[in-house]
Image (cartoon, rainbow, N blue to C red):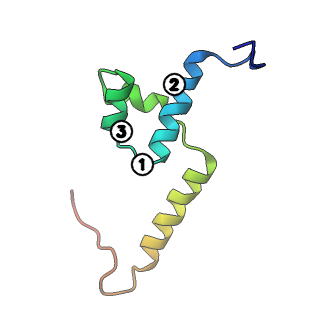
Amino acid sequence: MTKPGFEHLRRHDLRHTGLTWMADAGVPVHVLRKLAGHGSLSTTQRYLHPDARSISDAGEALSAHLSVRGSPSGPRLRAV
C-alpha cells in the first residue's frame, strides 16, 4: 500500500470499505456474510461502518414515518 501513497492504509481496511459500500448499495447482510466468508452475521456487521449521511437518512425516515401519526392509517403501537 505504500507504492500508491497510502502508508496508513492496510489491505484489510479495503474489506471494510468494500463491504460497507455494498451494504450502502442495498446488498443484504446475509449476502455480504457469504461474500466475506464469515461464519456469522455478527462478524460481518462489525465490518460495516455507516457514514453520517446514512445515519441522518435513517433519522429522517423515522421522523417521516412518525409524522403521519395523526392520520387514520398512521403508525400504531403493537406488541411484538
**What whole-number distance in Å separates the C-alpha atoms at marks 1 and 2?**
17 Å
Among the two numbered marks 1 and 2 on one chain, the one whose residue lies closer to the N terminus: 2
Q: Which residue is pictured at 49% across the width and 46% down the height?
A: 24
| Residue at image mark 3 | 29
Callout 3: SS? helix
Q: Amino acid at mark 1?
A: Gly
- Furthest residue toward right: 5
Q: Amino acid at mark 3?
A: Val
- Furthest residue toward top: 2
**What whole-number distance in Å separates the C-alpha atoms at marks 1 and 3?**
9 Å
Q: Check disc 1: other Cα within 10 Å, few if <14, some if 14-19, many if 20+.
A: few
- Furthest residue toward front: 3
Does 76 sit above or below residue 55?
A: below
| Residue at image mark 2 | 15
Q: Nearer the viewer, mark 1 or mark 3?
A: 1
Q: Are marks 1 and 2 in contact (CB under 8 Å)?
A: no
Along the line of sight, which residue is nearer the eye, 28 or 50?
28
Residue 68 spot, x, y in % from top left: 42, 80
| Residue at image mark 1 | 26
Along the line of sight, which residue is nearer the eye, 9 or 65?
9
Q: Nearer the viewer, mark 3 or mark 2?
A: 2
Does 39 sit above or below residue 50?
A: above
Q: Which residue is pictured at 42% across the width and 71% down the height?
A: 65
Callout 2: SS? helix
Does 18 sit above or below residue 24?
A: above
